[in-house]
Image (spheres, rainbow, N blue to C red):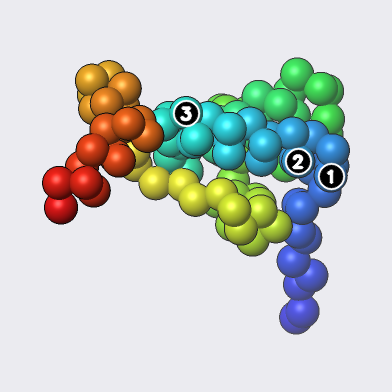
Amino acid sequence: MWVARVTWSIVLGDELENVLAEYIVTTQQMLFGFTPNDVRKLAFHIAEQNHLPHPFKKEAKKAGKDWLAGFLQRHPQISTRNPEPTSMSRAVSFNKANVDRFFAIV
């Protein structure tokens, strides 16, 4: 028996999905990374807040792994991983003047 597999790429729609992708990219540039679970929870929250019909399980309160895989394929500029903490002093010290000074010494 053949069963059609439903793809849920249109759950959030192009506009909301692009807003989510831009938000993730912007926060990654500010040294705040997202885990795969974080992205799945955000997608569920967006779908709920916008009263969109979705296949996500309400008990888990996050989008499925299939949705995440499709989302990451549609937005290859996003990478999800378990971020390592960056100390504030390290983040602040990484600026043009300090980098120029480092390469002047090397």
Question: Which class describes the residues within 10 Å of circle 1: few (<14), some (14-19), or many (20+)?
Answer: few
Q: Give the residue type at disc 3.
A: Met
Pointer 3 residue: 30
Q: CA distance from mark 2 to mark 1?
A: 6 Å
Residue at image position (15%, 52%) is 106
Toward the front, the furthest residue is 104
Across and down, in percent, residue 60 comes to 53, 31
What's the residue at 76%, 41% (across, down)?
18
Q: Which one is nearer the viewer's eye here, 6 or 23?
A: 23
Crowd rating for badge 3 (residues with CA inside 10 Å; few <14, some 14–19, many 20+): few
Label 2: how many residues lie within 10 Å, few (<14), some (14-19) or many (20+)? some
**Dot 1 lies on which element?**
helix
Q: Are marks 2 and 1 in contact (CB under 8 Å)?
A: yes
Q: How far apart are the alpha carbons under marks 3 and 1?
A: 24 Å
Of the image marks 3 and 1, the number of the one nearer the N terminus: 1
* Closest to the observer, 23 or 96: 96
In terms of sequence position, does the residue under pointer 2 or pointer 3 come before the other?
2
Helix, strand or loop at label 3? It is: loop
Residue that sits furthest to the bottom in the current view: 1
Q: Is residue 10 left or right of residue 69?
A: right
Tell me if I can see residue 70 in this picture: no
**Which residue is label 2 attached to?**
18
Q: Is residue 1 left or right of residue 105?
A: right
The Cα atoms of the two marked residues, 2 and 3, are separated by: 18 Å
Residue 14 shows which numbered tag? 1
Q: Amino acid at mark 2?
A: Asn
Q: Amino acid at mark 1?
A: Asp
Please determine whether, in this image, residue 42 is positioned above or below residue 56: above
